Image (cartoon, grey):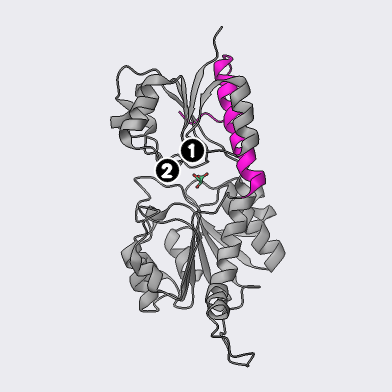
Amino acid sequence: MSKPKVLVTRRWPESCESRLWESFDTVFNADDHPLNTEELKAALRNYDAVLPTVTDTIDADVLATEPLRCRILGNFGVGFNHIDLEAARRRGVAVTNTPDVLTDCTADIAMLLMLEVARRGGEGEREVRGGLWTGWRPTHMLGTKVTGKTLGLVGFGRIARAMAKKAHFGFDMSVIFYDPFPPPQNAIDALGAEQCGTLEEVLERADFVALHCPGSKENRHLIGAERLARMRPHAYLINTARGDVVDSEALIDALRSRRIRGAGLDVYEGEPRLNPGFLELDNAVLFPHLGSATEETRIAMGMRVIDNITAFFNGRPPGDQVA
Ligand code: DGY
């Protein structure tokens, strides 16, 4: 029997590409360019499996392409807000993602953003590299202490809980959270966390607010001007979830006018083209979507996709099927 034809939309770590090459009739994206709509439609017409990632918008229009050959979208990433799951279901295309394997590294980046913005790491590095550092003095570049403060989590899924663990047990932080679908009480208690009744309560009480909710139509601009105004003036916002969960204009306004103290961002509306207003702000730390970017995790993500499509083509349910 011939091997399933597979298209990988972006370059993957070498060990993952080798395994794909051995198991499937695989085509790689040699120059790693982001695919456009026409290329994605062609992929769905010509391959049994397409392995997309966050840079590929697979909406109802793309999924409406004819004749459709693709039977599974093996997404490289845990978030799947770039894929229209309803349209995929209608077209009989299975969709899988890669949970678990990126939990710790993404939580680590959220911790790094929190520490870096609070302790002014980005500003400090710019000063040193710019040859502007004049030496130690008691009033130089004073930041905010992180240890012992209150961390407010918006969403309490896997990544939020990993951050809670690091913050509570490593930095002695009090952890509060809001999630409409909370885990069982024993999981909450094990992390020493406290559940809040509303998102507003988290915003009003936290010294650091970290976003860990999924990207979705419902969560678009969940954090806008009104909710930013609920935050404490000395508080910081950390976003490693999805850019459009926050209204960028409102956040830039709040940072510029110091209505909040700072923000640490890994994701942006319309990335990689971020709102230029962010670039002018010293109180924003800006990372280029690094959440899962470690060798270990990216290899584990690729292997997880391969496990999912291998199960699918062997007639078994993939472990991480979301549609
Ligand atoms: C994820 O896994 O969702 C990352 O943000 C990359 O897509």
Residue 226 visible (yes or no): no
Residue 209: image location, x then y, percent: 50, 64
- Label 1, label 2: how far apart the Cα atoms are: 9 Å
Nearer the observer, 208 or 26: 26
Residue holding disc 2: 55
Q: Tell whether circle 1 marks a residue whose Cβ is less than 8 angstroms from ligand 1.
A: no
The first of marks 1 and 2 along the sequence is 1
Looking at the picture, which amino acid does disc 2 mark? Answer: Thr
> Is 200 located above or below residue 259 in the figure?
above
Does 288 sit left or right of 84 as displayed? right
Residue 223 is drawn in which quadrant?
bottom left
Q: Residue tagged by mark 1?
A: 10
Tag count in the figure? 2
Q: Is residue 127 left or right of residue 108?
A: left
- Residue 129: x and y in percent read 56, 77
Across and down, in percent, residue 115 comes to 60, 69
Judge whether 284 appears above or below 57 on screen.
below
Which residues lie in the magenta part? 294-323
Give the main secondary structure of the magenta stretch: helix
For residue 99, side relative to residue 154 (left or right): right
Residues marked 1 and 2 touching at CB (< 8 Å): yes
Q: Secondary structure at mark 2?
A: loop
Could you tell me which residue is drawn at 55 percent across and 65 percent down?
A: 113
Which residue lies at the image location 55% right of the left edge and 16% below the top edge?
313
Q: Quadrant of the N terminus?
A: top right
Q: Residue furthest bottom?
A: 138
Q: Quadrant of the C terminus?
A: top left
In the image, is residue 298 part of the stretch drawn in magenta?
Answer: yes
Of badges 1 and 2, the one in the foreground is 1
The relative height of residue 20 versus residue 120 in the rendered view (above or below) is above
